[in-house]
């Protein structure tokens, strides 16, 4: 009887120990669960707090970048302005250079025209007694105008022929007129196969000249005397 009572009492003690152990384990499980929950909640809160800050910093960075971009655009505009200024200066220099070259070319053409038209020192001489002659002059600086012809020369009064054109050139040189603006009113034989006489004026200018020329073998026609007429007797 006593032995059975002892066994029952021992069994109750074991059950009590089991119950205490189960209770402790349950409490530990609850504590662990609460700790995990609180830890997750803190992480989410921290994450939520950090993200707006990052967004704010990013937006702030964008706001700061805008003036930087504007400054870059301003620098670019300045560079463009400087480039345009340099291009304008280069264009102006080119225009000045071009104008200078054109002036030089025009001067050279004028000099050539003057030489071509017989810009020579003239000496007035006694006239032939023709009442229509206002003055008569000659020049030692007159030279033959050159020729494309070779061999024995034959004077040709055919308009447009090589000899005709070379006679016109010599007449323009003696009269001091640009051949391009010269009007050839009359061209005739000068009394021999190697002489000719031309009556000319320049454009609408009423001043008229009678030019005497002679042929120089191998060198072409050369002006020898010029008469300034009072009136154009070949008009």
Image (spheres, rainbow, N blue to C red):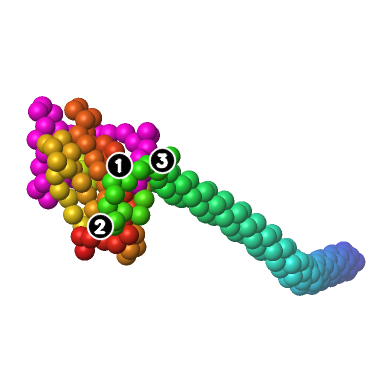
Mark 2 secondary-structure assignment = strand
Marks 2/3 in contact by CB < 8 Å: the verdict is: no
Residue 91 drawn at (x, y percent): 54, 55
Q: How many badges with numbers are in the image?
A: 3
How far apart are labels 2 and 1 at the CA level?
18 Å
Q: Which stretch is magenta?
A: 136-165
| Residue at which label 3 appears | 123
Q: Quadrant of residue 133?
A: bottom left
Mark 1 secondary-structure assignment = strand
How far apart are labels 2 and 3 at the CA level?
24 Å
**Against 108, is 233 above or below?**
below
Mark 3 secondary-structure assignment = strand
**Against 83, is 226 above or below?**
above
Which one is in front in this view, the residue at disc 2 or the one at disc 1? 1
| Residue at which label 2 appears | 183
| Residue at which label 1 appears | 225
Residue 106 drawn at (x, y percent): 44, 49
Query: Which residue is at a point 20% across and 34% down the rendered structure image?
Result: 215
Residue 103 drawn at (x, y percent): 48, 50
Residue 228 drawn at (x, y percent): 33, 53
């Amino acid at each position: 009887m006593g032995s059975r009572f002892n066994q029952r009492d021992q069994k109750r003690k074991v059950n009590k120990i089991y119950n205490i152990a189960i209770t402790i384990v349950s409490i530990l499980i609850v504590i662990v669960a609460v700790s995990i929950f609180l830890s997750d909640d803190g992480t989410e809160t921290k994450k939520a707090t950090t993200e707006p800050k990052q967004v704010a910093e990013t937006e702030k960075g964008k706001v700061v970048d805008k003036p930087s971009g504007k400054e870059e655009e301003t620098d670019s505009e300045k560079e463009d302005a400087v480039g345009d200024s340099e291009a304008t200066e280069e264009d102006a220099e080119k225009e000045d250079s071009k104008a200078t070259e054109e002036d030089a070319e025009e001067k050279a053409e004028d000099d050539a025209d003057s030489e071509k038209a017989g810009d020579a020192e003239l000496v007035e001489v006694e006239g032939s007694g023709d009442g229509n002659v206002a003055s008569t002059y000659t020049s030692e600086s007159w030279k033959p105008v050159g020729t494309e012809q070779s061999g024995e020369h034959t004077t040709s009064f055919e308009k447009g022929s090589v000899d005709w054109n070379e006679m016109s050139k010599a007449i323009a040189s003696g009269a001091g007129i640009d051949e391009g603006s010269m009007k050839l009113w009359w061209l005739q034989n000068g009394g021999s196969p190697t002489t000719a006489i031309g009556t000319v004026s320049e454009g609408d200018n009423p001043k008229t000249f009678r030019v005497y020329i002679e042929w120089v073998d191998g060198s072409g026609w050369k002006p020898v005397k010029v008469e300034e007429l009072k009136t154009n007797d070949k008009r």
